[in-house]
Image (cartoon, rainbow, N blue to C red):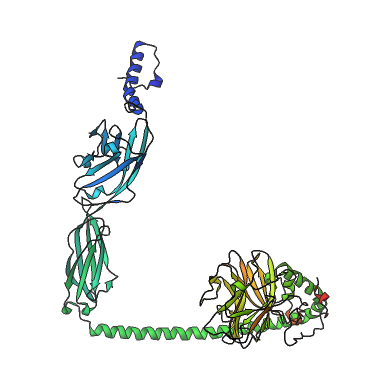
């Protein structure tokens, strides 16, 4: 017999011509099947749609796996096929208006049939009789008309409830009683739970499962009951798909529990005493070793300190000559990285733009009174606030980018409760609310006679500032608060959760208090540097004392700065 493919036929002789003719005829039926069209027209495009949710079937029952075409059309003359993971694993084949049995899987022969009631409306379904455990899984329905075909997937979940659990006592187990629960014929794997008479669940038990030839599960769950007062224990088995549960309880008499031996108790006491003695000896040895080690470390530290003092004395004269150059270098470092200049408010003002803030009357609480120029807020004459209330107003100007700052003067700052800072435009300010970065607020506040940040972080500032500068840096993503009386840094917040537009925020709670937005115009803060605090690297130095400066909004009192023989007094001395 000739097995040459048509492409290799070379008709040089009568034998070769017969061979090629036979090969072409053998492929003709496949070609006709591939290009066959329904009578009276050409192939139309369509979609095959299956169930969107898994189909649940009970063991031993019947189930239908439906599919339909869209748009609806007559599918009597189509090839319909339901198969498992492979095209060749056919569950049912309908072709030439009849079911084909030749390619059907053996386990489905005699158990499947096609539901033909709605073929003319584009709907078809395969009915599976006597559902078995191996029917569980994914299926594909395949519809073909001529050269065009489509398919859809569907899932069948098989569930079966087996026998009720059988519970029996198998014997003592160390300091308790071993109880075994067994259930047969469940699918899929059931959930086993032990419960005491009080309803409390036992969380610790062992479980084994096995599947028989039909795929059904047998469950064995072993529990060790150690409390003689438990009384009844219940084993429940639940089918997770059907939600059906079967349970059985057993009573454990108290004499079944093993009695504790007095020798065992004495042994445990002696073992505990020995362990305590051993721990005491180890602790004593470690303490002696630590004491000797500390003495050696202290001697080495004294030796190092002596050498360090000598080195510092040798470098003191040289450092005095280099002080002015080092101060100029330090200021250039702070100007290059504002995050390291938290203690110098006037240096930050060189890089920040003054923001003219006016209060928005529409955002003000009804108990608050605003000045005519919209720069000051206080309580109305008939109201003094309450510790149970939160009364706030926002700035009219929204901030979305750049670096800006403004200053606020607080009247009666020590004897009142107030807060100021920034907030997101979309924050909730109705009723009682919490001021925190998570809620969109970045503020400092006076509360319970303590000045600090909100939420409280345990850091309190003394003395209470009478004038606060707010420096908002959206480029670097932070907001910092400064005491503009002496130029010292108060608090800084990262704006990790900030998004959208930010607004100046002012809040009064109680007391004869007023918040006034100042012009922000003032002289620089002069910051003399003590000789002993010269940095040895480019790291941020420690806190430096500063001289107070005047501004465009008056504050009670004058705060002169410390004199320094190493720095000139004019502001031009701070220029690099």
Q: Is residue 146 visible?
A: yes
**Up-down relation of residue 1 to residue 295 (above or below):** above
Residue 238 horizontal/vertical position (percent): 24, 62
In the picture, measured across the screen, residue 96 lies left or right of residue 256, that is: right
Q: Which is nearer the eye, 231 or 242? A: 242
Q: Quadrant of residue 501?
A: bottom right
The part of the image, by quadrant, that contains residue 180 is bottom left
Residue 493 image offset from top left, x and y in percent: 61, 72
Residue at horizontal 23%, vertical 67%?
Answer: 222
Quadrant holding the N terminus: top left
Most foreground residue, 169 or 400? 400
Q: Is residue 441 above or below residue 77?
A: below
Q: Is residue 74 left or right of residue 171?
A: right
On the question of residue 422 being in view, the answer is no
Please say if 159 is above or below 366: above
Total labels drawn = 0
Q: Taking 234 as reference, is 294 left or right?
A: right
Name the residue: 27% across, 84% down. Answer: 265
Q: Residue at x 26, y 36 (%)?
A: 93
Give the percent coordinates (x, y) of residue 279.
Answer: 42, 83
Give coordinates of residue 451: x percent, y percent: 61, 83
Quadrant in the rendering for residue 83: top left
Q: Quadrant of the C terminus?
A: bottom right
């Amino acid at each position: 017999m000739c097995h040459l493919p048509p492409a290799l036929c070379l008709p040089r002789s009568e034998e070769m011509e017969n061979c090629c003719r036979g090969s072409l005829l053998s492929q003709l039926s496949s070609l006709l099947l591939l290009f066959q069209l329904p009578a009276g027209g050409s192939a139309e495009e369509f979609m095959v749609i299956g169930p969107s949710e898994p189909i649940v079937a009970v063991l031993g029952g019947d189930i239908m796996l439906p599919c339909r075409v869209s748009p609806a059309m007559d599918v009597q003359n189509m090839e319909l096929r339901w198969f498992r993971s492979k095209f060749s694993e056919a569950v049912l084949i309908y072709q030439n208006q009849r079911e084909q049995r030749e390619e059907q899987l053996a386990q489905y022969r005699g158990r499947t049939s096609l539901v033909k009631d709605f073929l003319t409306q584009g709907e078809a379904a395969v009915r599976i009789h006597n559902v078995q455990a191996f029917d569980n899984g994914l299926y594909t329905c395949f519809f073909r008309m001529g050269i065009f075909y489509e398919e859809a997937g569907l899932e069948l979940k098989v569930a079966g409830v087996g026998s009720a659990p059988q519970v029996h006592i198998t014997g003592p187990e160390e300091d308790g009683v071993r109880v075994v629960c067994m259930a047969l014929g469940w699918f899929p794997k059931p959930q086993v739970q032990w419960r005491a008479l009080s309803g409390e669940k036992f969380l610790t038990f062992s479980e084994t499962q096995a599947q028989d030839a039909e795929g059904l599960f047998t469950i064995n769950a072993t529990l060790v009951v150690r409390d003689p007062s438990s009384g009844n224990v219940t084993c429940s088995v639940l089918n997770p798909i059907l939600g059906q549960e079967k349970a059985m309880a057993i009573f454990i008499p108290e004499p079944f529990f093993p009695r504790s031996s007095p020798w065992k108790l004495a042994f445990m006491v002696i073992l505990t005493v020995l362990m305590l003695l051993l721990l005491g000896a180890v602790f004593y040895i470690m303490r002696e070793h630590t004491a000797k080690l500390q003495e050696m470390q202290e001697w080495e530290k004294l030796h190092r300190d002596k050498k360090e003092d000598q080195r510092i004395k040798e470098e003191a004269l040289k450092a005095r000559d280099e002080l002015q150059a080092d101060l100029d270098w330090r200021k250039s470092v702070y100007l290059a990285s504002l995050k390291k200049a938290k203690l110098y408010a006037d240096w930050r003002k060189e890089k920040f733009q003054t923001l003219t803030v006016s209060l928005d009357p529409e955002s003000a609480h009804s108990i608050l009174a605003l000045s005519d120029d919209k720069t000051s807020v206080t309580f109305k004459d008939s109201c003094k606030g309450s510790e149970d209330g939160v009364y706030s107003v926002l700035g009219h100007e929204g901030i979305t980018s750049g670096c800006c700052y403004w200053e606020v003067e607080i009247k009666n700052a020590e004897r009142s409760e107030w807060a100021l800072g920034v907030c997101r435009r979309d924050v909730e300010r109705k009723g009682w609310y919490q001021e925190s970065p998570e809620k969109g607020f970045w503020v400092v506040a006076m509360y319970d006679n303590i000045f600090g940040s909100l939420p409280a972080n345990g850091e309190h500032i003394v003395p209470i500032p009478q004038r606060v500068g707010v420096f908002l840096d959206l480029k670097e993503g932070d907001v910092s608060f400064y005491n503009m009386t002496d130029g010292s840094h108060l608090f800084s917040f990262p704006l990790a959760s900030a998004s959208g537009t930010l607004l100046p925020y002012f809040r009064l709670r109680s007391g004869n208090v007023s918040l006034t937005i100042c012009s922000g115009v003032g002289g620089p803060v002069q910051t003399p540097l003590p000789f002993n605090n010269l940095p040895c690297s480019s790291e941020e130095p420690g806190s430096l004392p500063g001289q107070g400066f005047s501004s465009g909004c008056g504050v009670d009192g004058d705060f002169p700065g410390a004199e320094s023989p190493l720095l000139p007094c004019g502001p031009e001395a701070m220029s690099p």
